[in-house]
Image: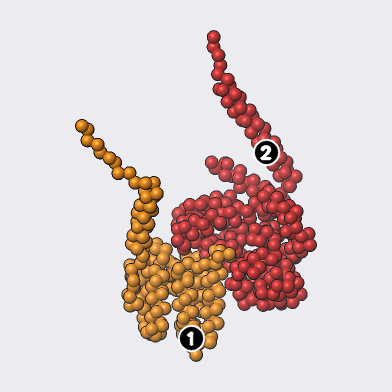
Chain colours: A orange, B red
Amino acid sequence: MARVTRKIRLRKGTRRTVGITLLLSLGLLWVLWKSPADRSVNQLNSAQPSPSDIDALTQIFTTKGHSEFQEKKGALRAAVAASLAGNNPSSESIAVYLFPDLLPSSDLEREVALEAWYPLQKRIESAPNSESSRKDFEDMRAQIWIYENPDHQYPTLSDTAEAVVKLYDRMSERKP
Amino acid sequence: MFVRKPGKFWTWGALSLSAFLSAVVCFFGWQHYKQRIQTHPMPADAFFTEDFPDHEAFRLELAQLRLQARLTPENEKQVLESVEKTAELLGVPQPVLWCLLFQESRLNHMEGYGSGGAVGLGQFSKFSFYEINHQLTKFTPANLVALEAVLGRDVRPISSTALKSTNQSSYFYIPTAVVASASYLNNRYLHLNKLLRKQNHHPNDRLMWLLATLAYNKGTRSILSFIKTVEREKGPKAVEAALTDVHSLSELVMNRKLVSQSFTRIWPRNLAKTYANEWIIHFQNTTQCALHPKAKASAVAKKGENS
């Protein structure tokens, strides 16, 4: 007598559920894999400067004060300078908004930054949390938004620009 | 006895008839287009049309807006008069300014009121107001001169909070919106010109107005990133050609891959693609609306020669 084998057939609804669950799991795995690793406040990724390095500077200014901030900013500057030669867009953006003097003289954005927000940033850093720093921050923020925002309906800034605005917002906050 | 299948006969007959009709339509369309160019001779220095919008879709839309009373004759007249006066004072080509406003708001001076987002004729946002109110003369004192000439006095601060559309400090007052938007556009134009000339480029002024409208809509950074990408991918000669020849500029600006590439240096990939699509549509609409038919035709003809 022929052996009867019976295929196990899942119902259509069950097949769909299993499929969706598998897809969601893969998606979750991918998201977790892509998430940036936590950075300690004192670490800077010298290989690939990124907007999170600017966020780290904001935290350093808030928790450790101005001189430590200047030291870490110097370290970020060196990392960006080293990375710029490799045509790295993230480093280029950081240079535009924080270190425009590192950009080559042929770079069109260098001139924009040196004239627009760079002098205001220098002034804020020389007198943080002062009344004048707040006015300078308002000017700086407006210039960055006007320069970069690509959408009138849903205004937005790039991660780098947003991180820089947050940094100088913190540096120009009026303390009671 | 040979019997032809009726199916094949009718299929070939239909195809032949379609081809014939298409050829007839194309022929008459081409004749109409040639006649239109001949009845709108382009003076030697004309680049922008006097008969704006020179864009079939915009003309249809305009007709619909009038029909549906979404654009009243009084408002349309006030927009046009303000555009004429402001354009003359600032040196902005009238078609560029009008087409920009049409593109941004379909000439609805109350567009976006109460939305919390961009508002009015020129779709001003919070920082657009900041520039007009605090940095109006950053690139030229002519902006303030124009404001005072059009409105009779310096009406700043201009804002979107005053609803009364006859209040001169309200962006919903048509002449105020036109002169403020024109000043903002003028600043983009002057800024781009200054940056490019400082790098020893010699951009064509008329093309700079087209780029200024893109900067108005997408930010100056989008233009500079685009130029840098063109230089990187195609060399400095391609940049020079784009800044001096409308055909070269059109080809590059509407190169979706190139534009996406330039935006990906700033934005995440999906956003970069969205902005690239919007940029191309904006450029197409502005050039179709504002350029003289012969200027448009010569760009197309050149493309045909090179293909």
Q: CA distance from mark 1 to mark 2?
A: 67 Å
In the rendered image, the quadrant that contains the N terminus of chain A is: top left
Image: A47 above or below B241: below
Residue sticking out furthest to the left: A1
Badge 1 is on which residue? A129
Q: Secondary structure at mark 2?
A: helix
Residue drawn at 50 percent across, 90 percent down: A176
Q: In the rendered structure, which amino acid carries the disc numbered 2? A: Trp
Of all chains, the one bearing label 2 is B
Please state the horizontal and vertical placement of residue B223, each as a whole percent of the image: 54, 61
Q: Which image quadrant for residue B173?
A: bottom right
Image: B106 above or below B15: below
Residue sticking out furthest to the bottom: A176
Residue drawn at 34 percent across, 63 percent down: A32
Q: Horizontal placement of B176 versus B10: left or right?
A: right
Please state the horizontal and vertical placement of residue B241, each as a whole percent of the image: 55, 53
Q: Is residue B60 visible?
A: yes
Badge 2 is on which residue? B30
Residue drawn at 48 percent across, 88 percent down: A175
Please state the horizontal and vertical placement of residue A53, each as a whole percent of the image: 38, 73
Q: In the rendered structure, which amino acid carries the disc numbered 1? A: Asn
Please state the horizontal and vertical placement of residue A135, each as a whole percent of the image: 55, 82
Q: Which image quadrant for residue B94?
A: bottom right
For label 2, the crowd category at 10 Å Cα-Cα, with few meaning under 14, some 14 to 19 and many 20 or more, is few
